[in-house]
Each structure stands twice: as C-alpha cells, then as structure tokens.
Image (tube, grey):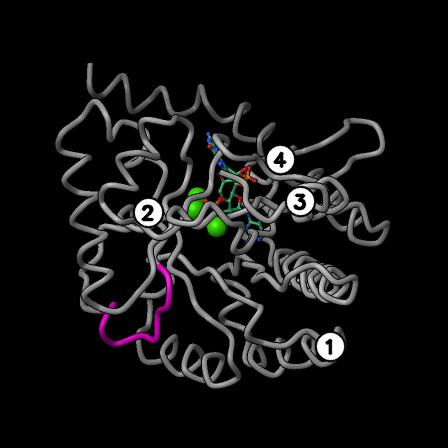
Amino acid sequence: AKEAGRNNFQFYTPAMNAKTLKRLELENNLRRALERDEFVVYYQPQVEIQSGKIIGMEALVRWQHPHLGMIFPGEFIPVAEDTGLIVSIGERVLRSACAQNKSWQDAGFPPLRVSVNLSARQFQQQNLVKHVAQILRETGLDPRWLELEITESLAMKDVEFTGKNLFELRKMGITIAIDDFGTGYSSLSYLKRLPIDTIKIDRSFIRDITSDPDNASIVSTIIVLAHNLKMKVIAEGVETEEQLSFLRQQQCDGMQGYLFSGPLLAKDLEGLLAVAKVL
Ligand code: C2E
Ligand code: CA
Ligand code: CA
Ligand code: CA
C-alpha cells in the first residue's frame, strides 16, 4: 500500500500544474495591483484594558480588486512573500499607515501609535532602516507613533542581524512588537537579547481561555513573563466579554479583537477616535 501511495504522486501532477499556473496568474495580478494602487489599508483599534481607551491601531492590508471585490491578506501575502512582491506592498502599507496617522494627528485627534506588519523579506533588505527613516521623514510622523510587528520566527532567524536592525530602529524611537507570540516553537532567549516593547499573544491561545485551563495558564504565564521583562502585552482576537474579563483579571495591558472592533477603513475609525472612552 505504501508503494502504491508513492506512485500515486503522478496523480497529483496536473493539479500541481494548475496550482503553479494559478500562482503565476496571481503574481501577475499582484504586479498590476501595485501599478494600479489597489491595496487599501484597514485599521483595527487596540484598546487599553484598564482604561478602555484606544491606544493604537494595527494596519492590515486588503486588496480591493476591481472585479473580485475585497481580497484578504491570507490569499495573497504568501505568494507576495515567495515572489518578493511583499517588499513593494509592505512599503506601500508602511507609507500609507504613517501618512494616515500623521493626518489624524494634524486633524487634532489624540496621538496614537500605528502598528505595521513587517515580513521576513522586508527585514532582509539591506537598507530597511534607512528606508523606514525616509518614510518617516517624508510623512512627517514622529517615530514614537510607529510600531513594527515582527513574528517570532523572524526574530529568531538570525538574532545577530535582526538585533542590529531592531536596535537601530529602536534608537530612532520606533517600538517593536512580537506578533503571534507562542506560535513560533522557539526558545525564549531572544526575548532578552532583542529590544522588544510589546508581546502580542496569538489568537489561538485567547480563543478558549475560558474553557481550556491549559490555555488560560499559558496566557497568564505569558503576561507575567512579559511584565517581568518590562514589556506590554496585547491579546489578539478577543471576541467575548468572558475573554476580556479573564484578561482584565490577569492584568493584560491591551486587547485587539471583534469584541471591540474589526479592522476599519480610516474614515470609519475616525468615528471611534472621536469618542474618548469606549469600554
Ligand atoms: P495578524 O498580523 O496576526 O493580524 C491579525 C488578524 O486577525 C487580522 O486578519 C485581523 O483582521 C484578524 N482579527 C482581528 N481580530 C479578530 C477577532 O476577534 N477574531 C478573528 N477571528 N480574527 C480577528 P487579516 O487582516 O486577514 O490579516 C491576516 C494576516 O495577514 C495578518 O495576521 C498578517 O500576518 C498578514 N498581514 C496583514 N496585513 C499585512 C501587511 O501589511 N504586511 C504583511 N507582511 N502582512 C500582513
Ligand atoms: Ca500583526
Ligand atoms: Ca498576530
Ligand atoms: Ca497571524
């Protein structure tokens, strides 16, 4: 049966070709989308749990396709990463997010931090730090209102190189968050070697904190660990009041999730920003 299974590989070849074709098509479409400026940045508010105030927002990209409508990042980020197009897309997102944040500040809204996701490919660019500095200069955003989110696996990949970049970014006044914390199967040693300000606990741990005691203790332990290391903690994917009250009890600093709001267009977030106290 094992041998037959192996020979069955041929059976998958046409499907794989179809998949390759689809990727090629997607790659071409992504290039065109860049030319036509079809990427739109949505903003999901982050709320301080103690005060109920909005403390920041995460920039999340969507592809507004002229015929297919809105396409979510899960469908194109992996291909954008493989092809390197993520570098241009990511740059667009970073510039938009900084410009938008500056324009909110200029309009008199209380200043908030905007978090932007950085992919490994972007991080490998030799001139990343210069590039970020240039975007900040161009948009006029004070670096303290920018946070960059990197994943654990990226942080761990090459701690020397990553560390050098992160320390330079930090020196400019930018803050650094570790995204999807707990999903990277990595050693925790990077936490003390890298300049990290915020830990974002992955949604998969938050999902059943109220029903799964193991997840509950993982989450409360991450919070204590982060606080001992002088880092802030944001819980991702908070959807219920029960989850929020558990997080409040554990003194989690911030939360992001549908319970408060999903990602919004900039103009729709303005309505929320106008309200000082929200919870
Ligand atoms: P992420 O960075 O972990 O972003 C959080 C994702 O969780 C977002 O999905 C957000 O819409 C979703 N989310 C927020 N609150 C809730 C909730 O309460 N429940 C549930 N079920 N989901 C919630 P989205 O926008 O589809 O983005 C997916 C991923 O795509 C992101 O995960 C991030 O890894 C990537 N991504 C998005 N924008 C960018 C970008 O500009 N650059 C890069 N490199 N990656 C991006
Ligand atoms: Ca993120
Ligand atoms: Ca995340
Ligand atoms: Ca994620």
157 w.r.t. 63: above or below: below
- Could you tell me the amino acid type at mark 4? Phe
Q: Estimate the x, y position of residue 92 in percent, counting from the top left.
A: 71, 60
Mark 2 surroundings: few (<14), some (14-19) or many (≥20) residues within 10 A? many
The numbered disc on residue 72 is: 4
Left or right, 185 with respect to 204, comes to left
94 w.r.t. 205: above or below: below
Q: What span is in magenta?
A: 190-198
Residue located 63% across and 59% down the image? 90
Point out the frontmost of discs 4 and 3.
Answer: 3
- Which residue matches tag 3? 42
Point out the frontmost of discs 4 and 1.
Answer: 1
Q: CA distance from mark 3 to mark 2?
A: 21 Å
- Could you tell me the amino acid type at mark 3? Tyr
Is mark 2 in CB contact (under 8 Å) with mark 1?
no
Q: CA distance from mark 4 to mark 3?
A: 11 Å
Q: Secondary structure at mark 2?
A: strand
Q: Earlier in the sequence, mark 3 or mark 2?
A: 3
- Could you tell me the amino acid type at mark 1? Gly
The numbered disc on residue 171 is: none
- Which residue matches tag 2? 201
User: For the image shown, how many numbered marks are present on the structure?
Assistant: 4
Residue located 53% across and 23% down the image? 15
Q: Secondary structure at mark 4?
A: loop
The numbered disc on residue 140 is: 1
Q: Estimate the x, y position of residue 197 in percent, counting from the top left.
A: 37, 68
- Could you tell me the amino acid type at mark 2? Ile
Is mark 1 in CB contact (under 8 Å) with mark 3?
no
